[in-house]
Image: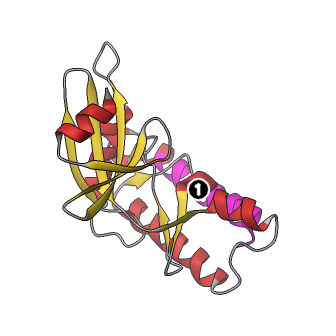
Amino acid sequence: MIQKIISSLGYKIRKEYSSSIFLAYKKNTPVIIRAEEDDEQGNTSLRKEKHVLQLTQGIVGIPAFRWLYETPKAIVLAREYIPGKLLAQLSKEKGRKKVLDLQNRQQRSMLEQTLHQAHQQGITNTDLSEEDVLIAEDGRPYLFDWDCAILKKDVSAHEFRKACRTDFEDLDRVCKAVGL
């Protein structure tokens, strides 16, 4: 059903990363598409991710939101496509060695800056893993998968500060695991 919806929007799927994540093109413009079927109450994590991506528009290191499409049974979100590889994939390819030989400190610093800017916008990731960090072909790291994010407006100041600390602890764990 999801693939039919994507096709009906005029996109051609070029690669299927999972049953819910696709690389698709329309008029030679690539996007990453995430899709979910709604549960009976109409809940989906993609609505939250759409909101987060809109709030983080312009933050370097977070792919830009493109569009959201909803049907009575599914929701489809498109974000900017960035050519590169996930840290998890790079780590498997290179073993426990350093994932990248050059610019490791710069990449870690860029990830820290991206998280800091998201926190300034009132958003924490809360679920950062090697699967959520993409290293672009130019070496720039990107954070994505914000469906578990916590918004500052939804929690107490104490809970938000705790979530911010957890983000940096998760980032530290991820960076140590892959040698960044």
Q: What amino acid is found at the position of numbered circle 1 in the picture?
A: Arg
Seen from the viewer's position, the closer of residues 140 and 114 is 140
**Residue that carries the numbered disc 1 in the rendered image:** 165
Q: Is residue 129 visible?
A: no
Q: Position of residue 105 (x, y in %)?
A: 65, 82
Residue at 71% in and 83% down = 101
Q: Position of residue 104 (x, y in %)?
A: 66, 81
User: Which of the 4 quarters of the picture holds residue 147?
Assistant: top left
Quadrant position of the N terminus in the picture: top left
Range drawn in magenta: 160-180
Q: Is residue 152 visible?
A: yes
Please tell me how crowded label 1 is: few (under 14), some (14-19), or many (20+) other residues with Cα within 10 Å: some
Q: Position of residue 16 (x, y in %)?
A: 45, 45
Q: Position of residue 159 (x, y in %)?
A: 50, 43
Determine whether, in the image, residue 66 is placed left or right of residue 145.
left
Image color mode: secondary structure
Seen from the viewer's position, the closer of residues 26 and 51 is 26
Seen from the viewer's position, the closer of residues 67 and 18 is 18
Seen from the viewer's position, the closer of residues 105 and 88 is 88
User: Which of the 4 quarters of the picture holds residue 59?
Assistant: bottom left
Tell me, yes or no, whether the highlighted magenta stretch contains residue 179. Answer: yes
Residue at 46% in and 48% down = 160
Determine whether, in the image, residue 2 is placed left or right of residue 170.
left
Residue at 45% in and 49% down = 145
Residue at 36% in and 31% down = 36
Whether 43 is drawn above or below 69: the answer is: above
For label 1, the SS is helix
Report the residue that reaches farthest toward the top: 40
Tell me, yes or no, whether the highlighted magenta stretch contains residue 4. Answer: no
Whether 65 is drawn above or below 107: the answer is: above
